[in-house]
Amino acid sequence: MGTAGPLSRNLSWIHSVAVIVGTMVGAGIFVVTGTAAEIMGPAVPLGFLAGLPIVFSTALVYAVFMSGPLGEHPGGAYMHISRTWNSTLAGYVFIWLKVVAFIGAQAVFAIGFGNAIRYWPVFRFLPAEWWAIAFLTLLFVLHLVGVDVFGQAQAILTGLLVAVLLLLGLPGLFQIDPGNFSPLFPEQLYADGLVGPFVAGTSALFFSYIGFESLAQTAGETENPRKTLPRVFAGSVLFIGLLYLLVSVVVLGILPWEQVAGSETPLTDAAATYFPVGTAGIVAVGSLLAYATTANAGYMSPSRILYALGRDRLLPDVLTHVNDRFGTPDVGLTLTWAIAVAFVLTSTFSYALNISLAALLFMYVAHALSLVALPHVNPTLYERSALQFGPVTVAVIGLFSAGSMLVFLSQTISLADLGPAIQQLLAGNVGEALLSSSLLLLGIWLAIGLLVYAGYRLSIDGELPARLPFAFLEE
């Protein structure tokens, strides 16, 4: 299984909470309310409420896996899927789709940070791209010198971010006009029925929740992870859902939905009506913190995924190298930095971003269905989980999560775009073709991944053991 070095277990439950909260309370909360209002009007708070049980069920799927032996090791969904089905290929397929999106997202967050910091004139002496590279370099150093350093920084930044949101949101509760929620379903948006706009709006709001699964990548570095991480998954998702509900009720309760719809700064617009002074500056600080917390939490994911793939000998085991001094996966962190910087310098992160949400949703579906199958195809592994439900309950949780993700996926990818995109590809317009169809881009990236998988397995001329989990898990 490779020659992986030991990771340092220096993350406490406070750090774990900061990781998941900081990831989810990202920059999206500052803009996504406006996007959703354009689709579903003043029913946005109901959309957040509808999304909460979906995200909670998905978090429960992770919690069950993390409460067992797999909760001791990084790799997240890759480990859970591959060990359920005793197949590295099954886990590899879905995590391969996502790993490039993780790194691409780092470039996107870094550019966002670069733009946000230029709100203050004193920082305008550098373009956003160079601030982005400086930000990625700072993250690299922060993660290299110790997971505890990363955890402490994440806790401080996340605490400040939540404080900013509460500072902006709580006073607004006393300024709400109930008339802004009437009618709740405006005729101009719901003329053809309630279901279509509500589902589309809820799908847009789901963007605010994505990324919480990054917490699973801390499993190899968290103290008592099998007890800590399941609780953090469940509790933090509920907290974030309530925070989002607060923000959406305030924004839609203060401003008419027509004004919120499509606004790039809905929270700023609402807070400016009741906050005495400096609203734009406070929101700018919040935006900066949002990019920082999301990027900081997400930066660790690619290196831990690469670590897990290297340990299973699906990629070169140099990826499992752990720094002797700091106990961090230095090769994986360096590779993450280099690719993210390349994305920034070449402005090609849009390709990774274009498949990010679809890749994540495919992974959620496969992950949830693996839990449904776990008690039947790998009962030994399931029985070692501390958080257990009956097979029927497990099936309900997993199928509800998977079914919901398939609905969201139908809003994300379009089969109708595939034909024209293939025609563009055949005509030699490669860039336009790949950006016009996320399904085509996913298919090509998957084909590349399968070639990498087959090529490396052939190069090492080795076979995996007949049974994957237990010799490895009980080391």
Image (cartoon, rainbow, N blue to C red):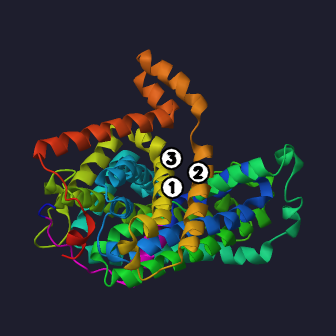
Cα separation between marks 1 and 3: 11 Å
- Where residue 37 is drawn, which disc sits there? none
Q: Position of residue 213 (x, y in %)?
A: 44, 65
The residue beneath circle 3 is 358
The disc labelled 2 sits on which kind of residue?
Leu
The answer to whether the residue labelled 2 contacts the one labelled 1, judged by CB atoms less than 8 Å apart, is: yes
Q: Is residue 8 magenta?
A: yes
The residue beneath circle 1 is 365
Q: Which residues are magenta?
A: 4-23
Q: Choose between 23 and 277: the one closer to the eye.
A: 23
Q: Choose between 297 and 317: the one closer to the eye.
A: 317
Q: Residues within 10 Å of mark 1 (few under 14, many from 20)?
A: many
Q: Choose between 318 and 353: the one closer to the eye.
A: 318
Q: Nearer the viewer, mark 2 or mark 3?
A: 2
Q: Position of residue 452 (x, y in %)?
A: 24, 41
Q: Is residue 45 above or below residue 197?
A: below
Who comes first in sequence, dot 2 or dot 1? 1
Q: Position of residue 467 (x, y in %)?
A: 25, 63
Q: Is residue 247 left or right of residue 412?
A: right
Q: Secondary structure at mark 1?
A: helix
Q: Is residue 234 above or below residue 282?
A: below
The residue beneath circle 2 is 406
Who comes first in sequence, dot 1 or dot 3? 3
